Amino acid sequence: MSVQWNELIARDASALRASEIRDLLKVAERPDVISFAGGVPDPDLFPVDAFRDIYGGMMACDAQARRSLQYSVSEGLPALRQWIVDDLADQGAMRDIDNILITNGAQQGLDILARLLLEEGRNLIVEKPSYLGAMQAFSTRLPNYVGVDAEDEGPVLSQLEDAFAKGARVAYVAPDFQNPTGRSWSIARRKAVLELARRYGAVLLEDAAYSKLSYNGAESLPSLLSLDAEGADPAMGNVIQLGTFSKTLAPALRIGWVCAPRPVIDKLVLMMQAGNLHVSTVNQEAALHAARKLFPGHLEKLRVSYRAKRDVMLQTLTDMMPDGVSWTRPEGGMFVWLTLPAHIDARQLLEEALEDVKVAFVPGQAFFTDGSGANTARLSFSTEKVDRIKDGITRLADLIRRKDNQ
Ligand SMILES: Cc1ncc(COP(=O)(O)O)c(C=O)c1O
């Protein structure tokens, strides 16, 4: 008798679904397609020479090489955690090394936090729209999503308060250059959201994946973590922050971290032990060397390059898009969020865009938990060159104008 996989696969694993647009987006990888679909950093900006030296240097000395190739503690390397504590302090968030856990990218942080804080039917507040990967991690726990609409300044406070008042105690939020919209919350909204969380004893999972990619030269706005002064007591605070080197050094390092009150970290460390023991020792050391050696100069290089791409995308949208199409104006990160006239379905538009004008993007509906957003799209400006960005947006605008006139 053959194995009855449908019966064997656990209910929460069954909740995992492949994205319907994945196959469509495979076409986006063809060189003749101008792709605004990927959400990955520009590989031309990876500090390859520095990593060649760093990994070579680590292997050049016998004692160092043996340390780097050995198992290490589940919390993560103390020196790397201390670097993160110092960096947070520079941003005004006073935390302790015991508040930091190193994870396999921020994605693993999302996964273990989901396992720690969510269970079937428990309310989870998410912004509408939200990062798809986070929702994939959360969905395995079968939570009850409570969507809160987002305005340019941040989430709608009355809706957030309503969700807290009805018993929700966990909210996943991204105040800086959000994936997928590129939006950033105003300082007033940051303070108001934190105040609400405090009033209801709720926790804010702050995804800070893009915080360092601020393009306007101005200082980044304070994180929820830094505004959460209670967190200076290592056991206290309403904010758990997720960080990563994926957008600032290289995603293949798979080095992220969770900054959380001690009771949370203590449990997460046990989950790390059970799940994968620890994050690669050699990559943690390489990331630490790279951060020490390259920051802040390398960050400035990233900002200059991405800012130029963003500028071209926004200018071409302004020059070319027909009336009735609107978009966000991100001050950092990698994404612009497009809202099309209500009668245009972005999935159908993607099919036509791939076929007719060889342009790819991600239809926005995937970023909503309630199936809304059919007329929205995420455009990433990170990997294409500026002339192709101009060309791609022009072609997309032509297609939308043609559809509008139909
Ligand atoms: C908002 C957001 N959070 C987390 C992640 C996961 O990043 P990491 O590579 O650190 O796992 C991503 C990756 O694209 C992201 O966009």
Image (cartoon, rainbow, N blue to C red):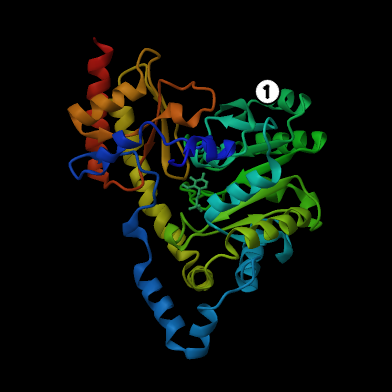
- What amino acid is found at the position of numbered circle 1 in the picture? Gln
The answer to whether residue 123 is seen in the rendering is: yes
**What x and y, as percent, mark residue 396?**
26, 28
**Quarter the N terminus occupies:** top left
Q: Please give left or right for residue 197 compared with residue 243 in the image.
A: right
Relative image position of residue 9 (x, y in whole percent): 53, 40
**Label 1 crowd bin: few (<14), some (14–19), many (20+), radius 10 Å:** some
Pointer 1 residue: 159
Q: Quadrant of residue 190?
A: top right
Front in this rendered view, residue 116 or 154: 116
Residue placed at 31% from the left, 21% from the top? 348
The location of residue 383, given as percent across then percent down, is 32, 48
- Provide residue 108's location: percent of width, then percent of height: 56, 52
The image shows a total of numbered marks equal to 1
Secondary structure of the residue carrying numbered label 1:
helix
Residue drawn at the location 24% of the way across and 24% of the way down: 352
